[in-house]
Amino acid sequence: MRARLMFTALRWLVRGLIAAESLSLAACGSARSTAPRAEETITRAVVEPSSAETSAGAAPVVVDEAPRDDVVAIRIPVDVERAIDDAVHTAITQRALPGAVVAIGRRDGLVFLRAYGARAIDPELERNDVGTIYDLASLTKPIATATSIALLAERGVLSFDDPASRFVAEIDRRITIRHLLDHTSGLPAADPLARYEGETREQSIARIASLRPEHVPGTQMLYSDLGFVLLGEIVTRASGVPLDQLVAREILAPLGMRSSSYRPDASWLPRIAPTERAERRGGVLVRGDVHDPRAWRLGGVSGNAGLFASAPDLARFARMMLGEGELDGVRVLAPESVRALIAGQPRALGWDRRTAEEARTRGLGEGSIGHLGWTGTAIRIDPARDVFVVLLSNDVHPDGRGDVRPLFAELDRLVGHHVQRFLPAPAREVRAGIDVELASEMTHLRGANVVLVTHDAARTRDGRRTLDVLAERDELEVLRVLAPEHGLGSDREGAIGDGRDVRTGIEVRGVFGPRRRPDDAMLEGADTLVVDLVDVGARFYTYASTMHQVLLTAASRPGLRVVILDRPDPLGGVIVEGPGLDDALLSFVNHHTLPLRHGMTMGELARLLDHELGLALGERLVIVRAEGWQRAHDGVDVGARWVAPSPNLPDLDAVSLYPAVALLEGADVSVGRGTDAPFRVLGAPWMDTTRVLEMLRASSVPGVSFEETRFTPREARHRGRACRGIRVAITDRATYRASITGLAIVRAVVAAHRERLDRARVLAMVGRAEVLEAIERGEPWDAVLARVDADARAFEARRAPFLLYE
């Protein structure tokens, strides 16, 4: 396949790194610093953001598949998501790591989960995914070992302040279990690997236990792998159960951490990220065996290292910690045990605990706990702010020269600075057509040569662009992308030119401007046109116009299919509002005789257009239905994150007001484009706001308020000129109607300033000459609205056969 997401930046890595010099897993013997990776050494990375875009027969097929339930609904703002993406992609291209999985969440669940780059680049390139299992290295210390000690303490088997020699007699009697947990035992960080040669596990443990502390226990901190080796042995001797078995039984299984284990089974190998080639193990690429040389010599099970896990599993552990020991109704630790583990500075029991001074220069706050792992793993949990971040990578792959720390520092900063902007869990589990198609393993696109009509706003439930997820699939080929108005990035104004998508390398052709219908060059080699566009349910929003052109193109080409990946109408699907459209006003913008607010999804519109235009696409028109959406639900009811489909629709309030306020678009009136309140304000330098407001308030428009305002647009109509105007706000979504609000605004401005308006432009937006004429004549308001209502009721009957949702 020609275009594969995120592999463009990796293929040169394979060529450049596979031929690197021989690698070693000898303790502290790689090109890195020999010092343990303490959190205190993290420095922030400065990352520049990158651009996502350069310059008649059978009925249509409606697909209704039951999707998977394991996709995380993204709950972070779009700008934060893009910053995370840029930071990780930058780290990959700078060879800091081959790939990564990032998981961010709160007690109630994940808010972000994404895989990047490659799981492996040696001996061959393997695409990463969120289920990749990583060697956690020192994350084993807090997650497996410290948690096991806390479990045994709350069950009365031991105490944090017991002498460690109670369980391992050779340990200096001054050293307590607490000293081992908080790295104040005085035991050295490591010992020479040569000493393990020829020793049994028991002999190695006895030798380590016999080491004399380098300072008086409890007086200073010295990070010690050896201390946690001994803690793992204490767990085994105190419980009578091997460490790995106790961890599996008492921690992993209750938490549902099904992709976590010491000594993972051979069947897991394809999912496990490899680390380095180990000279001391015959030069083999280590995969599925613990990377840490001491843990490996101790049989793969140790208190300092050895645990493997996926990012979703670590997220479950973090949620348990935020839940004071409980997850999904299952209690693993008592609240007092969790509090005991995370107390203390600078080291909690098994964790690094952030001080107030550190919190001032980083992201997550004072009292947050975290740890790093030598293989490129990291976690930080902030109980006070109910948030965690997990970063799993294999930065030691393939040559030990990577470094995940700057990236994790940047993620720490981003999460800490923006956690208050995270979204609550969606009110409803709604999946768009792209999610349904992915869940079906591309049943309807398998083997297709695709031209994709899409934009940045078209995302999966977990926040990925439809372009990205289709480009990385082996079952199909994305030949090129057709970008509608506002471009692939959903951020442009004016005609859309051609270019190439930076992430995927796929050619992008504009279909808004001189070209509005796909031509032969755009369709070369294609057998399927796939449409995934975020529409807003208004007659004159042009994404439906572009879909209209796609359908006309397919009708003229007998071998060409159209697959619509459907999405909910953000305005809801119950309410229909006129005015309708006169035939004389048909245009690219007013592409069909629809009412102002039609209450249909793109898939439903496609079915209506196929029938009313006589296209007879039949089985060549496939609608992949959204799941979980009901007509009564608008975007606010659904509660999913909103990604702006155009620069001036930044949120759902703007979307709701758009059909109303846009009726004056182009009529020498600014509708707020180029301000911080698009479609919430309208005005002009010449507007008599007193007269306009008097008329509006006399109309008793339901569900909205009108207030006088002043604003200066930065772009579009009246750019740079101070405007007197009206601010519109929805006060009651249940009674608000775009048609009543919009026509009341038109009526008021016409009454006050008829001579200043371009009547032809106003008529093109209103849609019905008789409605505008009635307003101009001063016809009673109720009579005007009756005409509008008649249009709506007539369209309700027209649309009924084509609706797909209840």
Image (spheres, rainbow, N blue to C red):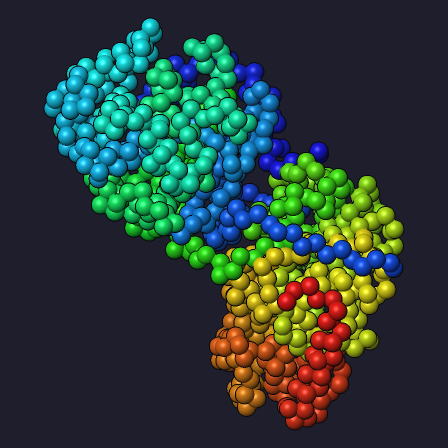
Q: Quadrant of the N terminus?
A: top right
Q: Is residue 764 left or right of residue 683?
A: right
Percent of width and height locating residue 715: 59, 63
Q: Is residue 165 left or right of residue 243?
A: left
The foreground one among 740 and 424 is 424
Can the viewer see residue 36?
no
Instruction: Residue 12: give x, y in percent of width and height.
Output: 60, 26
* Residue under the point 80% across and 45% down: 527
Q: As rendered, which of 334 and 2 lies closer to the eye?
A: 334
Residue 195 drawn at (x, y percent) = 30, 8
**Residue 299 versus residue 686 in the image, above or below:** above
User: Which residue does the image show at 48% across and 19% down from the upper left?
Assistant: 286
Q: Residue 647 is drawn in which quadrant? A: bottom right
Which residue shows up at 25% across the image and 29% down it? 239
Vertical order, 794 against 87 (above or below): below
Q: Residue at x 54, y 73 (%)?
A: 681
Q: Is residue 196 depicted above or below 289 in this figure? A: above
| Image: 319 above or below 28 | below
Q: Relative to 231, is 799 on the left or the right? A: right
Q: Is residue 332 visible?
A: yes
Image quadrant in which the C terminus is located: bottom right
Q: Position of residue 627 (x, y in %)?
A: 61, 57
